[in-house]
Image (tube, rainbow, N blue to C red):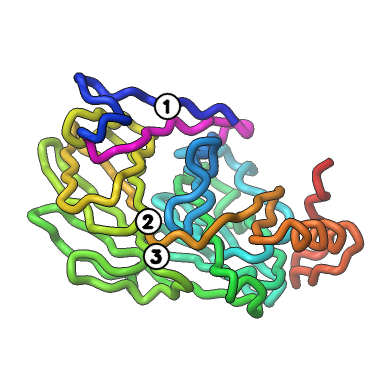
Amino acid sequence: MSIQERKPEGDCKFESGCDAITLVIDPREKDLGGFAVRRTLPNSRQKTVGPWIFFDHMGPAEFEPGKGINVRPHPHINLATVTYLFEGEILHRDSLGSLQPIRPGDVNLMVAGKGIVHSERERPEVTAARHRLHGLQLWLALPEADEEIDPAFYHYPSTEIPETNVDGVPVRVIMGQAYGTESPVKTHAETLYIEARLKAGQKLVLPDAEERALYVVEGSAQSRSVQLPCHTMAVFKQESGVEIEAREDCLLALIGGEPVGQRFVDWNFVSSRKDRIECARADWVNGNFPVVPGDQEEFIPLPD
């Protein structure tokens, strides 16, 4: 993937220690036929942020009637996926028998553990009309002690995700704890994920975390001398009191937490052990993964 580093405006350099930001990442954008996906994590300079190992920004995209998201069944191991939408709806199915529409503000947490298969499509009622889709797809690496736990599925409606107001800035605490507010979403390691909507000129002091990174979903922001345009991710040092200022109205997503150690990534498989990934690849080819009830006719083949 082609990830570029941005240099901050002004005299400060990342290496000089005069700024709280160590790296700014431009994601690689891929057009999937009217549907843009921007991949920020992993990349060559920043494999993970805390337990987070994968960060995709989907859309915003507008689909004509009859078109939409249609991801066939595929497997995962040793990770947890988080799906979060700003607009639209995705229909989640998995090999545990889960059947769950995901709507804006909901948190869809699927724990792959020792192995799970799922698909992401849209209901016919949605695809029948012109519609939009916009959201984030994230993966969490499970701690080594939890990599082979039984797979599980958790869905948290938007109404269960706590919101707070920080100096006039509305903040949703999606996972973990921040600003005296704690999310009910299950975690396996110390994990942070918040959403903030700032008006132009508003400022927000970021919550502390061992590792953390800020992604600009909409608008633009800055931290000290570093400008953060739309669709960039800033990786921060472990420093308290770091402040973000909105250059224009913006939507921000902050992720972070404790690192869980080195992980290997191969297609949809994440593990602390290369041999475990090789086993999973063979199991998918040989049909040893469970099927998805109600979505058994198709699957995504293992890439060459």
Percent of width and height locating residue 219 = 28, 34
Q: Is residue 208 magenta?
A: no
Compared across the picture, whether 291 is left or right of 182 comes to right
Residue under label 3, please give it: 191
For marks 1 and 3, give the CA distance: 25 Å
Amino acid identity at mark 2: Gly
Q: Image quadrant for the C terminus?
A: top right
Is label 1 in a helix, a strand or a loop? strand
Please name whichever residue, 303 or 126, is drawn nearer the observer in this view of the structure.
Answer: 303
x and y, in percent, of residue 76 in the image: 68, 61
Label placed on residue 50 = none
Which numbered disc flags the more N-terminal residue, 2 or 1? 1
Q: Is residue 259 left or right of residue 175?
A: right
For the point 8% across and 55% down, which residue is it?
167
Secondary structure under badge 3? Answer: strand
CA gap, disc 2 to disc 1?
20 Å
- Residue 286 place in picture, x, y as percent: 91, 62
Q: Which residue is mark 2?
A: 256
Q: Is residue 59 left or right of residue 297?
A: left
Q: Secondary structure at mark 2?
A: strand
Residue at 33% x, 51% y is: 254
- As measured in the structure, the alpha-carbon distance from the residue carrying label 3 to the one carrying label 2 is 6 Å
Label 3–label 2 contact, CB within 8 A: yes
The amino acid beneath tag 3 is: Thr
- Disc number placed over residue 5 in the picture, else none: 1
Q: Which quarter of the figure has residue 182?
A: bottom left
Residue 37 in sight here: no
Provide the residue span drawn in magenta: 19-35
Mark 1 and mark 3 in contact? Answer it, CB < 8 Å: no
Q: Earlier in the sequence, mark 3 or mark 2?
A: 3
Residue at x 19% of width, y 33% of height: 248
